Amino acid sequence: MAEQFDLSSESDSDADMEINMLVYDMAKRRKSIWKSSYMEKRRSHGEFTLTSEFSDSRFTNYFRLNRIQFNEVHSIIENTIYSEGCNAQIPIGSREKLAVFLR
């Protein structure tokens, strides 16, 4: 005959809850790794916006184009990749679309 366990005991569920909270806290701590100040700003300012803070050499390394080349390519394809948007949402700008493509 199989044993039946009473799962409604409050002391067991409290102990299980404490164990679950400890495991959750430990997992949360493991995930928190050091991030550069750039990565911290990325969430609030957006990655493309932060590229304006790049030095010229870093910009060139990041996009494989210098700023002048980036602007020339953008001027050539701007009308093709421009979007009006819909449902009252602001679309991604054509410069940011180009940046995503190049990245």
Image (tube, helix red, strand yellow):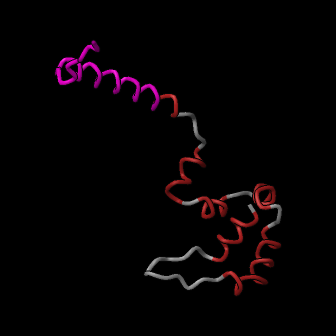
For this view, does 15 lie left or right of residue 36? left
For this view, does 46 lie left or right of residue 69? left
Q: Is residue 24 magenta?
A: yes
For this view, does 3 lie left or right of residue 29? left
User: What is the magenta range?
Assistant: 1-28
Q: Residue at x 52, y 54 (%)?
A: 43
| Residue 67, position as x, y percentages in the image | 78, 69
| Residue 58, position as x, y percentages in the image | 76, 55
Quarter of the rendering containing residue 46: bottom right
Above or below, 93 against 9 in this view is below
Quarter of the rendering containing residue 92: bottom right
Above or below, 1 against 46 in this view is above
Q: From the image, which quarter does the N terminus lie in?
A: top left
Q: Is residue 12 magenta?
A: yes
| Residue 31, position as x, y percentages in the image | 52, 33
Near-viewer residue (55 or 47): 47
